Image: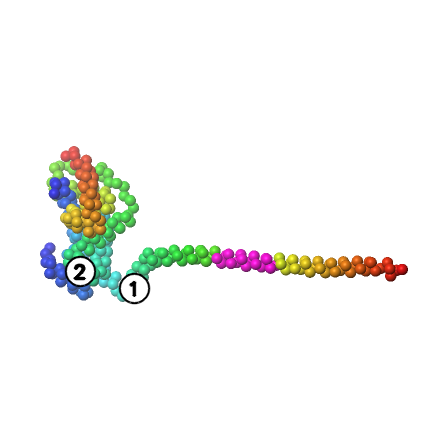
Amino acid sequence: MTTVTLPQREEALARSVRGDATAFADLVQEHQSMVFSIAYHFLHDRGRAEEVAQDVFVRLYRHLDSIKSGDHLVFWLRKVACRRSIDEVRKLPKAPPTSLEDVAEPVAELPATDPLLSRGLQRMVASLTDDARAVIILRYQEELELADIAEILDIPVNTVKSRLQRSLEVLREKFHRWAGDV
Amino acid sequence: MTPFEEKLRNALRREAAPEGFAERVVARTRRETQPGAKAWWQFWAFVSARVFRWALAAAVVCVVIGGGLVQRHRQDRLRQEGELARVQVRQALHIASVKLNVTRKRVQEINREAPSSRL
């Protein structure tokens, strides 16, 4: 993966605004993983996540002239990806709450990057409410500060803080019940 | 960051987008921003817009109210025609009654005159 410097990013953005398709493709390539992952962690379905991520970039293409800078672009993409994912989740029929029995039992010591552990945690995150899920994804996938999350989700910082604490409590409890036998 | 949060961070790390994702996005933007497609998209955006839904609801309300008004106008006209017919019948009865009175008085006069003429 090539690292894109800030001036390169600004240049690609300026060229995209002028209608350069190659520059726009470069922008997509640079941010596709971020947008796709936000959608994927919301939806847990790669097909739907790709559809949502494509919608986000098509919408970006239509609004390119309102993007002021590279930082604004990242902020815009995160905001639209979250909103579009929440809309998509709300369109789905209500799934029954994930039972701990549905998550495979861990069979050995759980290292930090164990795929089984990750899948289990992803499903626990998926069982949270849409708003709580957005906070968790932006905090731990995007590693954002609470103030940045508040700005993206358009809610007060204290609400982000309380949602994060509550969600962590719920996840910890579920995780300990799930992994307690090891 | 606590060990649990570290686990969460690992579970939610970014996933690679599917192969060929950027190409598909660029192809879609080309397809959807062609003049015809753009017009269609704008039309669809208009159709699905809240304004259109409200306008549609208002049109339905107008049709229902308009239908009611037409029906009421029809009933008013029927009532007016009925009223006119009633007035005409009363007038006809009045004329007939006047004529009968005149005839009755004439018959009484004839009856009164008849005995004296016999003498």
Frontmost residue, A24 versus A72 = A72
Q: Is residue B30 visible?
A: yes
Question: Is residue B80 magenta-colored?
Answer: yes
Mark 2: amino acid: Lys
- Hey, which quadrant is residue A60 in on the image? bottom left
- Residue A66 in percent (x, y) is at 21, 61
Frontmost residue, B78 versus B84 = B84
According to the picture, the residue beneath numbered tag 1 turns out to be B39
- Residue A145 in percent (x, y) is at 15, 48
- Hey, which quadrant is residue B47 in on the image? bottom left
Numbered range of the magenta stretch:
B69-85
Q: Is residue A141 visible?
A: no
According to the picture, the residue beneath numbered tag 2 turns out to be A68
- State whether residue A105 is above or below residue A85: above
What residue appears at the point 86 percent right and 58 percent down from the top-left corner? B115
Mark 1: amino acid: Ala
At numbered mark 1, what does the secondary structure look like: helix, strand or loop?
helix
At numbered mark 2, what does the secondary structure look like: helix, strand or loop?
loop
